[in-house]
Image (spheres, grey):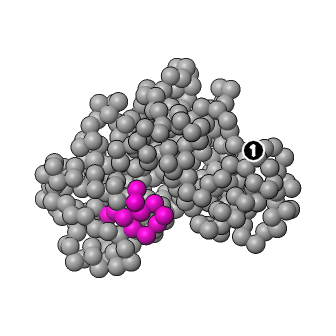
Amino acid sequence: MNRNELRKMKIAVLYGGVSSEREVSLRTGSAVLTALTRCGYNAVGIDADRDLAGKLLATGAEVVFIALHGRHGEDGTVQGLLEILGLPYTGSGVLASSMAMDKVTTKRLFLQQGISTPDFCVYHRGDNVENFTAQIKHWPVIAKPVHEGSTIGVTIAHNPEELAAGLEAGLAYDRTILVEEFIQGDEATVSVLNGVALPVIQVVPKSGFYDFSSKYTAGQTEYLLPAPFTREIYAELQESAVAAVAILDCLGAARADFMIKKGKIYCLEVNTIPGMTETSLLPKAAAQAGIDFDELVQRILESAGTEK
């Protein structure tokens, strides 16, 4: 769908929602809505609550820009609703969204396709905690709710007691917890826009761990752009990001996160709706590639015309 066509249509920007990442989504959506309006599009913002279908019909939306993060936005559920309503939308389709949101499914696909990812095991609500922690042979590990983002509910554990506490904390967000080897090395992220890798960013949080505060508080993290890796590592990161996104069949904008230790690259996960706030990584990478924020938003909008 080209820009001339899109300017004649009513565009709904979905933001907010009901996930634990609501506040981040409100910031992403506000930035996107402002950019679309500035660029001459007929855009309206919609807070994606439980009456989303009714709101979309009431506004006369013809195209949807999804600026939601987390559950009921990034996991294929909203995408499925929009498919039923017959509304074209930005980004990845139902299956790609749901697979990428599930960290365990993502990692299993990576391993099947030869993409390195940290060793892991999975804890399910009701499993015996002592038996589970006893199987861990190498510490530290990191425990993550399988279907959450923005490091919400994440714990780094150095022993069985810390892991037991981390599992309990994670269960407040999800019934399944991914427990993976904690890779202590350099952190990097690579955004992929319409199948093309953008410049690599090295992420250096002042706290030593890229948690929620480090991600969304200005000045808490240093972003090295372009990342000062060797030419070989830099190229491998970009190639791996494109491959990871392709394996999951993601469309529009996506972002793959990596750890690098002793020259080996480990892919952690893929985000199908990267943040667009003032501290977000996708806009930073796009700017380094000569794509300003307004242009980036329009390129993502054009993905609404892509067959899912």
Front residue of 222 and 73: 222
**Rendered view: 45 above or below 270:** below
Q: Which residues are magenta?
A: 14-24
Q: Residue 289: x, y in percent?
A: 34, 30
Q: Residue at x 34, y 53 (%)?
A: 28
How would you rate the neighbour count of disc 1 (Cα within 10 Å): few for under 14, some for 14-19, many for 20 or more? Answer: some
Tell me which corner region of the image, top left, top right, bottom left or bottom right, holds residue 230.
Answer: top right
Q: Residue at 55% of width from left, 57% of height from top?
A: 152
Identify which amino acid the numbered label 1 is placed on: Pro
Residue 194 horizontal/vertical position (percent): 37, 43
Q: Is residue 260 magenta?
A: no
Can residue 200 be seen by looking at this rendering?
no
Q: Position of residue 231 (x, y in %)?
A: 52, 20
Name the residue located 48 percent from the left edge and 26 percent from the top edge: 227
Residue assigned mark 1? 140
The one nearer the camera, 71 or 60, is 71
